[in-house]
Image (cartoon, coloured by chain):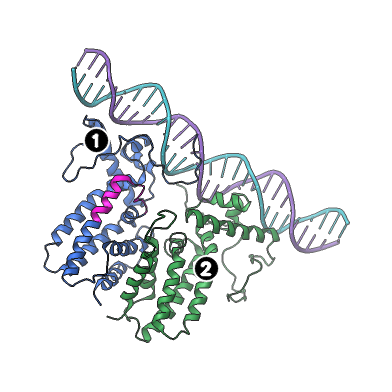
Chain colours: A blue, B green, C purple, D cyan
Amino acid sequence: MNQPQPQARPTAAPTTTSSATAAPSTGPAPITPTSTGRPARADAVRNRERLVAAAREAFAEAGPDASLNEIARRAGVGPGTLYRHFSGRPELLAAVLKGRIDTLCARAQDLLAADSAGAALAEWLGAFLDHARVNQGLGGALMLEELEAAGALGTDCHQRILDAATALLTRAQESGAARRDLSPADLLQLVVGVAMSIPHKRTSPAGDPEQPQRLLGLVLDATKPH
Amino acid sequence: MNQPQPQARPTAAPTTTSSATAAPSTGPAPITPTSTGRPARADAVRNRERLVAAAREAFAEAGPDASLNEIARRAGVGPGTLYRHFSGRPELLAAVLKGRIDTLCARAQDLLAADSAGAALAEWLGAFLDHARVNQGLGGALMLEELEAAGALGTDCHQRILDAATALLTRAQESGAARRDLSPADLLQLVVGVAMSIPHKRTSPAGDPEQPQRLLGLVLDATKPH
DNA sequence: CCATTACCGGAGACCCTCTCCGGATAGTTG
DNA sequence: CAACTATCCGGAGAGGGTCTCCGGTAATGG
């Protein structure tokens, strides 16, 4: 008996637990390990990479609501293959964003050694805003609404971003460049809000190109000690 | 190949005739004027009201993505009737929000006579945040992404909100309570971003109930002259 | 080289948006 | 009061999207 849920959230995969890739802590994982000890088959790895590449293209063109059928078609596989590798849209989104998030975290590490803690925080937030703006808040959608449904991968992404922001903000606070009554989560939330509220070029071609910088500047002003 | 823009309105011309001398003042419009001189039929008016009421309920329960079929079913009419009265989701959204926006604009008028221009702006922004948070940024969605597609009604709503914000902000600036290099559009955009980025109770039941106020406080800090 | 079994592809169930057209009816006229 | 007509209603259905299930296929270990 199917539950006739109207427009429900994508059903949390109740059956197959083998599709979840065990999270490798850090470092390149050349092959995706399965729940069994056996290494993944070569065609499975290839199809997964093709799917991520096709998804990256499609999300860039059509936004986070791109058709999953279309993504599977572009990757040259059937819809079933897509759903075997990813439980749904959130997980696919997370896979696409993973590389970007890696870059962002590495950037945070570099900036932790910068001279000015305040400038480092400002610069990283600018990079984060660029990140979150890609595909009209694609990152924001992942950070927020899908957080609970995305499973391990999404939560992991969220946590890594939060850790990076915490480190930079804490250092800025200790150097007196940022007010102390400010939590990393609130700060990120503000920037995500800016990203989500700004119309994307795709939907509104002739938007004000300076607005993101102005809004980020306002947020940065709010972080300074008064 | 398909034209995704369902702008075809077979029956009623959307352009308002310039001869309509009925002032757009705040007041009940007993009948919906048609393009022809004839008044609308009674059942048409009744169905329209039922549709708006059903939409208000459905949007409150399921968010801005509620099924339009479901809304029509709740209103006791067929899908065709819904699309005859409203060109699509944005227009229905705008109809639902109209009353709320009226209230908000009236509030702005009252606050323009308040003692403290800064406190008036802060209070109104708080009310606006509450407004925009209803149904998880339902208002924000209207203000931004649907602005161009919503036609006259949506644009009108957006303009009225913007006018109210402009009046309050200008007065605060003249009294020295707000920095002068701040545009009403940017300010609204920030608050809309806060509304859109905050997870709604429906999707994330146990969120931090204080966060909206904290984030709004940060935005307000950013408006003050440094 | 074969048995095993993880994997693939697509048919298809179900839902949503939006259109089209025969039939019903409110309001007008004689 | 009856007939007429412009207007409106309801639902069938096209088209597309998400997600599942199952028979066939081919990669892999022995």
Amino acid identity at mark 1: Val
Q: Say the numbered circle drawn on residue B100.
A: 2
Measured as percent of width and height from the top left, residue A13 is found at 38, 39
Q: Residue at x 24, y 63 (%)?
A: A125
Indicate left or right for B206 with A29 as reference. right
Which of the 4 image quadrants contains residue A226? bottom left
Measured as percent of width and height from the top left, residue C13 is found at 50, 34
Q: Secondary structure at mark 2?
A: helix
Q: Residue at x 32, y 65 (%)?
A: A190
Q: What kind of secondary structure does the magenta stretch mostly adopt?
A: helix
Q: Secondary structure at mark 1?
A: helix
Viewer-nearest residue: A183 or A137: A183
Indicate left or right for A224 with B3 as reference. left
Characterize the local packing of mark 2: few (<14), some (14-19) or many (20 or more) Cα atoms within 10 angstroms: some
User: What residue did someone put label 1 on?
Assistant: A45
Viewer-nearest residue: A200 or A187: A187
Residues in magenta?
A145-161
Residue A157 part of the magenta-drawn span: yes
Which of the 4 image quadrants contains residue B17? bottom right
**Does mark 2 fall on the same chain as mark 1?**
no
How far apart are labels 1 and 2 at the CA level?
52 Å
Q: Is residue B215 above or below residue A33?
A: below
